[in-house]
Image (spheres, rainbow, N blue to C red):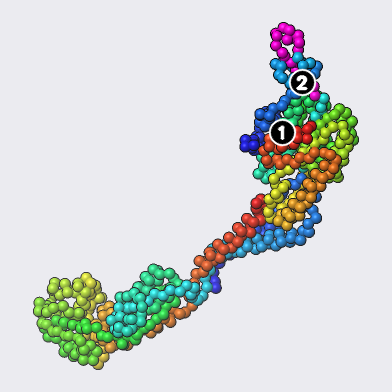
Amino acid sequence: MESMIDPAVLARVKDLPLLARSVAEGFLYGQQQSILRGTGMEFSQYRSYEPGDELGRIDWKLFARSDRYYVREAEKESETNVFLLLDTTGSMSLQSHNGPWNKLDYGKALVATLAYLAERQGDNVALLNLAQGAEDFLAPSKGQRHFHRLLAQLAGFKSAGGFADIKWLNSFIASLSKPSLVIVVSDFYQRNDELMTFIKAINVGRGELATIALECDDELDFPYQGPIRFKDLESGEELLAPAKQVKDHYLQALLHYRAELKADLLGLGVAHYPMNIDKPMDMALFHYLSHRQALGV
Amino acid sequence: MGLLSTIALWGLLALAIPVLIHLVNPGKGKLVWVGDIKLLKGVKNNRVNELKIKRWLLLLVRLLILTLLVLLMAKPYIYGQLKLFGGKTILVSEDWLTASDAKQRESLGDYHVLSPNHVWQQLAMWHQKTEYSTQFDVYAFDCIDSFESAVKPQFNRPINWYLTPCSNKPVAGSSKTLTLIADTPDKRLLAALNAIKVHAMPMLKVQVVARQNELNGASDWYIYQNEQKLEVSLLEQVAKGRILFVVGGEGETKPWGEGSIVPFSLEGAHSGAFPELLLSVLNQHLPFSQRVGELSLGDAQLQITPGEDATAEQKVAVERYLIYLLLILWLIERFIAERRDRVYD
């Protein structure tokens, strides 16, 4: 994968539809598998018969007219609802000191791209904001207009506050009726395990659940030096410490936290994908999708 | 230790600036936002004290820098000689060199030759020319005519004197001539000149001529005892640097070319002290280096040895060392501050 899009370039694209299309088509090129063709109600096209096709699918009336074998094809109707859940809490505004964008911007671009892909596959796409006070839920639907409404809503997301009210989220959980794919995009920083509680609540076997954890370089490398005032993005809590001294402890704690998170999610049967926002997004997406394909979803 | 301009000490008020900054600025370090502070907790924070110490250290260094700057403006000096760097310059007067034997010259090593006259001026020149911590070794005769100078220069450097007494100086072969121009020479004058020749200046040659036009060769002194007007030939001689005493002349000594015309009285010629008086008058109108005779020799010995003054404590400027110190402190300050201000690797 030599021609990945530099995140610095991607971050400069303010136009979400363009961004989503660029990323999606960039790596879909050559392995396109957009709308599934097959048997269904909605007619799509005729195609020449090829050995191996079921004889029953040959359009005999057309054969009578043209003396050639044609097979009727219809759009495969997707019954899947894709729920895209984006965390926009305060901690999502975290950014590497030399990074091009913060976690929320990356998350938006990622969700937009996923929405684009889902839309091209003919799935119903829904969008949910997981932050408190910004309770937006765009019900699952399909079509260009819906897609653009989704992007418009996505563009308006700001990172602030804590996690959404669990009562309100319950109403969302109730709407998870159809078999669905739920993708949670978050940094997985939680105060009182609220995100895990929520994931347990929606992971009730009605569909597939995947979580994408956003990380940044500074978080992973801890490149600080000297006395630093560490301040929490959500609680505002401050801690003064020499970076050198806390570094080892921090890295260990982070490692432990990440391992624990992954173990917990796997224990729930939830696929977990960490993505670094300072690395090319198409690369991360490629890995994510190929992994999903391998799982056969 | 002292300061040349104490008014600059008011600059010490500037010390308040870093102190105020230190007090106002909490200096807690740079702000870094984190997603979850829980990951950072649980470390004993005993090294916060280290940060505080660094802050105080930085303040101290900055105060020192300011103090040094103020001191630099106040032009500090210390008494004594700074013998921080080695180095030696050997200066030998020419007459000492001619009087020395080969063995002595050998022991000198590399030396520079000074002309026998105006030693002070030459030393001043060498003083300017050389690194001021270089030591001078001066070999010379302590004759006063060697050190003839209006003002003895200030040397802020060690000078080792190797002075040979003036009396050991070999007499130069130059003889003095005196021409008395007189129709009838004064007998007292002739007697006094004779006494000088016998007792003080054995090399003195006295000529007596009746007329100016009978002059025979150049002479160091001329005594004119005639009534006639001075002739051009005589005045030409004077203009070349001779001294002409006009007996019974009036007025002040007046310069004539390089020489001078001096009025001279024969009053007191009958007293026994007249030869001495005459000798001193003759000497008066010669440069030190050319003076002769026993009477002036007594005074010619240096009353104070030149070395005595040089070993006395002198004001030595220490600015240069302050600047070095300032530079080092500044580097330390930058080192601490840079390390403190750097947030990222």
Magenta stretch encompasses residue A64: yes
Q: CA distance from mark 1 to mark 2?
A: 31 Å
Q: Is residue A269 left or right of residue A121?
A: right
Q: Which residue is mark 1?
A: A109
Q: Quadrant of residue A82?
A: top right
Q: Residue at x 74, y 60 (%)?
A: B47
- Kindly state the secondary structure of the residue where label 2 is placed: strand
Residue A243 is situated, as x and y percent measured from the top left of the image, at: 71, 54
Q: Is residue A233 left or right of residue B105?
A: right
Q: Quadrant of residue B160?
A: bottom left
* Residue A194 to residue B129: above or below: above
Asked if residue B8 shows in the view, the reply is: no
Residue B270 is situated, as x and y percent measured from the top left of the image, at: 22, 91
Q: Is residue A24 left or right of residue B244?
A: right
Q: Residue at x 52, y 67 (%)?
A: B321
Pointer 1 indicates a residue of which chain? Answer: A
* Sequence order check, earlier mark of 1 and 2: 2
Badge 2 amino acid: Gly
